[in-house]
Image: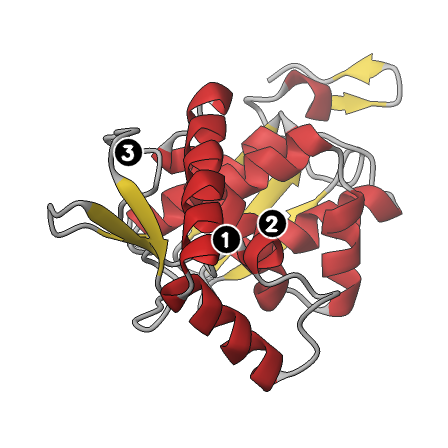
Amino acid sequence: MAYIWENYNYERRFEVDIENTSSYVEIWDDGGESIKVNVLKRFENIFFPEGIIKDSEDFKELEDKYRNIDKYKWISNILLHYLAQLDLLKGITRKEEMIQMKNKEVHKYLNDELNSFFLRLNQENQYKILNLLVEKEKRENRVSLFDTALKELFGTVQIYDDSYDEIIYIYVDAEENEYNQKMYELIKTLFKDMFVQDYVMWKNQHPGIIEIEKTMKIGLISVNM
């Protein structure tokens, strides 16, 4: 997938062309003088602003102007060159672009409650989740990132796989509260294999786990094994 900032050449001409639009393609470059750009992928609100476009006829009329009227072709070329250089100045990368795409798509995987929770997360935690979704797509869903997501968002996490019961037991070293429960449900929805059952144990809600000193206490008394 190519973007306007890749192999940028200020001498080339950009043209708005959305006839063969695809959500995964931004440019078509056959090596000629001009590069055709699908502005709907990232720049729809710039080239087809809501305040101007009232219906499909308005959309088609403006599209025709970008394709056939010299003044509109000149303006769109200048604007796309500016946007390409802005990308370069921002240091945008292919991965960052994929993360931006996931940010627009993540609501499709969530119910209203979890989507609202995701939008309230701080920028760092949102980025961690989106980055993992990109990694999940790169691996074509062949490898579960459920445990990785839990550890990145919660820190101390222990996962025990009981093949006999076909259940994974998860100890999360965090308080059981509304925020943490929602975070767990969010991670579970986005990353857990739907065919695997899970049982989560929160801080102070678990049997003793020998590898974790915090769990080997009764009140103020440490239990030594």
Residue 210 versus residue 107 in the image, above or below: above
- Tell me which numbered mark, 2 or 3, is placed earlier along the sequence: 3
Label 2: how many Cα within 10 Å (few below 14, some 14–19, many 20+) = some
Closer to the camera in the image, 59 or 207: 59
Residue 200 versus residue 147 in the image, above or below: below
**Numbered tag placed on residue 128 in the rendering:** none
- Circle 3: residue type: Glu
Residue reaching furthest to the front = 70
Query: Could you tell me which residue is drawn at 34 percent across and 59 percent down?
Result: 24
Q: Are the residues flagged by discs 2 and 1 in contact, CB closer than 8 Å? A: yes
List the residue tagged with mark 1.
191
Give residue 205's quadrant in the image: top right
- Tell me which numbered mark, 1 or 3, is placed earlier along the sequence: 3
Mark 2 vs mark 3: in front = 3
User: Does residue 147 appear in the picture of this structure?
Assistant: no
List the residue tagged with mark 3.
6
Q: How many marks?
A: 3
Q: CA distance from mark 2 to mark 1?
A: 6 Å
Closer to the camera in the image, 89 or 177: 89
Query: Could you tell me which residue is drawn at 58 percent across and 65 percent down?
Result: 109
Residue 129 versus residue 112 in the image, above or below: above
Give residue 112's quadrant in the image: bottom right
Q: Where's residue 1, x and y in %?
A: 26, 49
Label 3: how many Cα within 10 Å (few below 14, some 14–19, many 20+) = few
Closer to the camera in the image, 184 or 78: 78
Quadrant where the C terminus sits is top right
